[in-house]
Image (cartoon, rainbow, N blue to C red):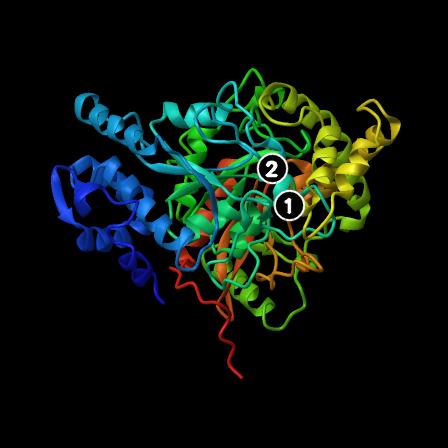
Amino acid sequence: MQRRQFVHSLAGGLAMPAESSAVIGATAVPAAAAATEDEALAYASASELQAQMANGTLSAERLVRACLANIEAIDRNGPQLRSIIELNADALPLAAALDVERRDKGPRGPLHGLPVLIKDNIATADRMQTTAGSLALMGAQAPRDAHLVARLRAAGAVILGKTNLSEWANIRSTRSTSGWSARGGLTRNPYALDRNTSGSSAGSAAAVAAGLAPLAVGTETDGSIVSPASICGLVGFKPTLGLVSRDGVVPIAHNQDTPGPMARSVAEAALLLGVLAGPDARDAATRKAPSNVNYVLQLDANALRGARLGVVRSAFSGNDRIDPIYERALELLQARGAVLVDPVALPPPERYAESELTVLLYELKANLDAYLAEFGQGSAVRTLADVIAFNEQHRFREMPHFSQELLVRAQALGGLKSRAYLDALANNLRWSRREGIDLALRKHRLDALVAPTGGPAWLTDTINGDHHGAGFSTPAAVAGYPHLTVPAGYVNGLPLGLSFVGTAWSDARVLSLGHAYEQASRHWREQSFPATLQIEA
């Protein structure tokens, strides 16, 4: 079944207005026509939607109704992506109020009236839950919005809902199934429903790829934005650590956690980043963050001319079906004027694989306890120890597929003054920054590194857990440096992403390089939600 059949099958359903009609501006249209328009709006860009609202042919309320209808048809029914864990019951009245404001005062900015989905580990002081996918946090009442949510609201965005995720952002078990949470179930991949979405921002990626909303916010500790974005054929951007505040975000590790935008184009990701980014007194890492930067204006379709890019050959898979796609991407970069330094070496991941996990677990215990003390009110838990006990008590619902050995290991550790923690952190920064990315960029006079983001989506396996191949997320994640993934092509219909990585605070340059590649390649495509891959014999 194609997308339009899903949407038309639910015309006049719960997401439609009364009397089976929808409103565009002041014009009522029949439900069947509304369903057709819902489909047309599904993949419209943020700039196209904003232009329609500016000229009066579309209202924010109508746009939100279209998103709700598409969610009902595709996320709740049809292919049942399960990408959205909860809808904002106030989205329609908020959109209507923003329409009135536009009419009376004009728009607040380029996000005015646009629906945005946020990951269910980002706190909102409204009727929605913030649970990180865990039943343990059901009932928690956020005392205030996360900093980034407050910025979205101030910019006039409509928080449409919360997206599903890998529970606890994939820090619970070494044998997890990405995209699964006890609260939301399993998020399914729009490119092949039996394939994994990767994690942990699985729902944000799947929802935007399926056209359920134009923009979404994910979070990353190591790969949780760029990997699901790559696997779902999207643009995903992990900014420099501290560019976007982590206040109000369920934490893992303060030396690696960051929210970031997920969208269908670099321009849309840059648009969203411009609203998310800025200093916050509650997050010391943001003290150097520039504010009020227009990242869209800094995009340059000719940015590749003369740019020096280092090719990280060690990130290539050796798969003769996949590597040629990336070789063509490199050829395109050269054709657009880039100078490739090929290869460029980075320290092998083994240099800091163990120390990375050590830092994550030490910081998880300290950070989560602090978060729960403020944002856990009303839930059954206040500490990591409470979470572990809750999971054991509710094992049938919380741990039907995998356990919580990483949480248990974190709980057994000491504080952040422990020698083991400090040594691990120093090792991480040495091999990821000083003798890693920064050394490579300086030695070869590079603007950025390029590499495959990772492989294609794997078959979901709830018995053995994830079995993805190599990826390129770890160097930038451990260093806290910007990492952009852009669609690079397809293998058997499954997307692959190309990564651009720079040094600290080079976010605008990295986005511009990726934008120039995207404008030359144009690999993004709409979805038809096949149950499985149709592989030719």
Residue 429 seen in the current view:
no
Q: Which mark is residue 413?
A: none
Residue 46 seen in the current view:
yes
Q: Position of residue 330 (x, y in %)?
A: 54, 61
Q: Residue at x 59, y 21 (%)?
A: 377
Q: Which residue is mark 1?
A: 397
Q: Secondary structure at mark 1?
A: helix
Residue 315 falls in image quadrant? bottom right
Q: Which residue is mark 2?
A: 135
Q: Position of residue 168 (x, y in %)?
A: 64, 39
Q: Amino acid at mark 2?
A: Leu
Up-down relation of residue 289 to residue 180 (above or below): above
Most extreme residue toward the top, as rendered? 281
Residue 26 falls in image quadrant? top left
First of labels 2, 1 by sequence position: 2
Most extreme residue toward the left, as rendered? 27
Does the residue at mark 2 contact the one at mark 1 (Cβ under 8 Å)?
yes
Up-down relation of residue 488 to residue 145 (above or below): below
Q: Amino acid at mark 1?
A: Arg
Q: Residue at x 71, y 50 (%)?
A: 402
Up-down relation of residue 10 to residue 391 (above or below): below
Q: Alpha-carbon neighbours of circle 1 within 10 Å: few (<14), some, or many (≥20)? A: some
